[in-house]
Amino acid sequence: MRTFLAILVLAGCGSSPPAPLSPASLDHAPPPVPPLPPGPPVARTVDVVDHQFGVDVPDPYRWMEGNANPELKGWLAAQGAWARGELAKLPERDALLARIRELGLGSSGVSGVQIASGRTIYTTLPENAQLAKLATRDNGVERILIDPETIGGEHHASLNAYRLSPDGKYVGYVIATGGGEVGQIHVMEVATGKETGDVIDSIWGEFAPSWLPDGKAFLYTQMTPPPPGGDPLQNMIARYHVLSTPAATDVTVIGRDADSTFAMPPQGFPTVLAEPTSSWLVAISGGAGVIQRVAIAKRAELDLSDRARTPWKMVATDADGIQATFVHGDRLYLVTFKDAPNHRVVSVPLAAPDLAKARVEIAEDPLADLTEVRAARDGLYLVHNKGGLAKLSRWAWRGAPAPVALPGNGWIPAVIADQRRDGVTFVLSTWLRPNAYFTYDPATGTPSPTGLASRSKVIDEHVVATEVEVPSTEGAMVPLSILHFADLPLDGSHPTILQGYGGYGISQTASFAPTRLAWLERGGVIAICHVRGGGEKGRKWHDDGVKTKKLNGIRDVIACAQYLIDHRYTSSARVGIQGGSMGGILMGRTLVERPDLFAAAHISVGEMNPLRMLNAENGANQIGELGDPRVEVDYKAMLAFDPYANVKPRTAYPAVIFTIGLNDHRVSPWMTAKMGARLRAATTGTRPILIRTDDDAGHGVGSTRDQGFVTTADVWSFFLQQFAQ
């Protein structure tokens, strides 16, 4: 594959930190098959045992692996049909769905603002709409440019990435279908709404085109055909396209076969950035993590021959800890965590970019993590994370950083700047209010609303966000955000959802969701555990939750769950854990470690079997975060945090609902299938384990509102039924 009326409390748990986790279960005895009520087909097992680095690891559901697997497809279809039937019987489901739809469809959303040459574009999700649309403003009046709901086909279409050309004339955008994220680049003339006819295939949905300053050509990232059984997210290339020319004539400017001057691993995703005010190009190779390797070249040196040999000059490798890069004047600016876990900004001359001689521009703040840097004509704009709240400041090009007063407390998920104009536009987000965009003009020194804002018909004034820190292992104090009604009695009775992610240094900062009210109205609590592996406390917080330290995140979830129980928000019989994607490891491993601590779990499109990730799509892309199973120290660490490998036979597991999209190319659906089958075979309890499938969805990107609403109603009503037992 983000805080606000807030009550800040720094509190201890009241109990001792959790004990070290037990080692992986390597029981070779075949799991018993307990008597079960009538249900979906029981998965067959195979006698497969991996023998690696002196360790034997049984894998009884190895047969499920592979995307082109007819037997698995049939098995999953039966699981999905069974799950739909069981969920339809839940007594709370219909009422919950009706309320969720009322709250959700009664709200509108604005996001993804881009500004260039006086033109503003953004995505809008109007009331009652199912999918986000691309829009612009003409004299303050909104005009829809692209409405995916009008695009016909067997599966629904969705708008993924997009980028406005520097002159504001064109927008290049990516359309995908069925939630699968692999789509096409199209180009539209913004003023007229007419398509140019430029269409480019095999584009991963995250990658918008990168325009050259004249707006007549762009660079883009493209997938390449994999070998049979290979990973389609490896060996991507960067190409050059001139408007109104056939895509077949596009030239590769970065690629393993085309250009050896930019060293890049197979799992690297190459992108090329062109700053409109500069004659230099910046090439970046990144991936699922946040580290970038960086190279530069003059735009005039871009080699457009059939065998491109652009003379890229390497500036930074993975060891340099670069997380963001941009050009200003004759210098290259880089945001790095090397020797600065809370990040700092350094610069080097473009003519001689030697990081060993880099000039420190913005020093590390030991008390706040630098999370975003944007360059405007008048200076750099910086966002720091201090205790979950955003602090915005302006650095007037070699001056001293000065704070910018914000219109309220919250988080800033995006800053929009342009080196051809002064000031910035930013969005302010909170747990309790919809997002709103503001413009800061350095001439006035005051942010002002732009008129672009998300809106909700229902905002309950009684909802608060309580912020605490919970002690975990190794002295870590884990931030925990707790959403609830202000008058909530602490009597241990409340149905509670504990969420977490813990990957890639991504912070779970404050964001508003009107549909949460449907849970809170039932006396519920929603808690977000900001575990190690995220970025809430800088790079060290991330490093303390990856690879050989991945189990720290699981310990953090256990500590946060115990805090909620000890402080009488809930009880073990009324708490469910929830995580998705990389958060599947977090919650899946927590589930098998402490099945006694929860009544239920929801794992969405989860990474369930990282030991086998190199046999899955997008698997090699996770090496930087999880480790390499071909390396002994990494393999043994992965064995310890692999949820599937640690399922213990003859154990009473809580109720579990897995949700997956069958078009998922980020995390292979067979990982969920293996985990679900093994849990079913292992459990001695009677609580259900369901696998809910959607054949018109992928990783969740591009799903319709109703798809999300129905999934939420299914999961919440499933939780409520389990809490009632």
Image (spheres, helix red, strand yellow):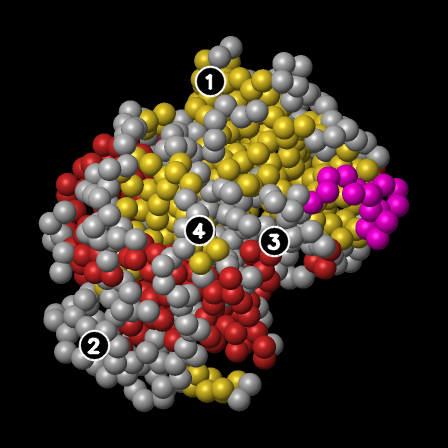
At label 2, the amino acid type is: Thr
Q: Nearer the viewer, residue 554 or 194?
A: 554
Q: Nearer the viewer, mark 3 or mark 4?
A: 4
Residue 145 x, y percent position in the rendering: 47, 24
Inter-mark Cα distance, 4 to 2: 36 Å
Cα separation between marks 1 and 4: 36 Å
Report the residue that reaches farthest toward the right.
352
Q: Cα distance, mark 2 to mark 3?
A: 41 Å
Per the image, the residue denoted by label 3 is: 539
Query: Which one is closest to the eye, mark 1 or mark 4?
Result: 4
Sequence order check, earlier mark of 1 and 4: 1
Badge 1 element: strand
Identify the element where label 3 is drawn.
helix
Q: Which residue is mark 4?
A: 469
Q: What residue type is disc 3 on?
A: Arg
Mark 2 element type: loop
Give the residue drawn at x 43%, y 24%: 453
User: Mark on residue 451?
Assistant: 1
- Magenta span: 347-364
Question: Amino acid under label 1?
Answer: Gly
Residue for badge 2: 684
Closer to us: mark 1 or mark 3?
Answer: 3
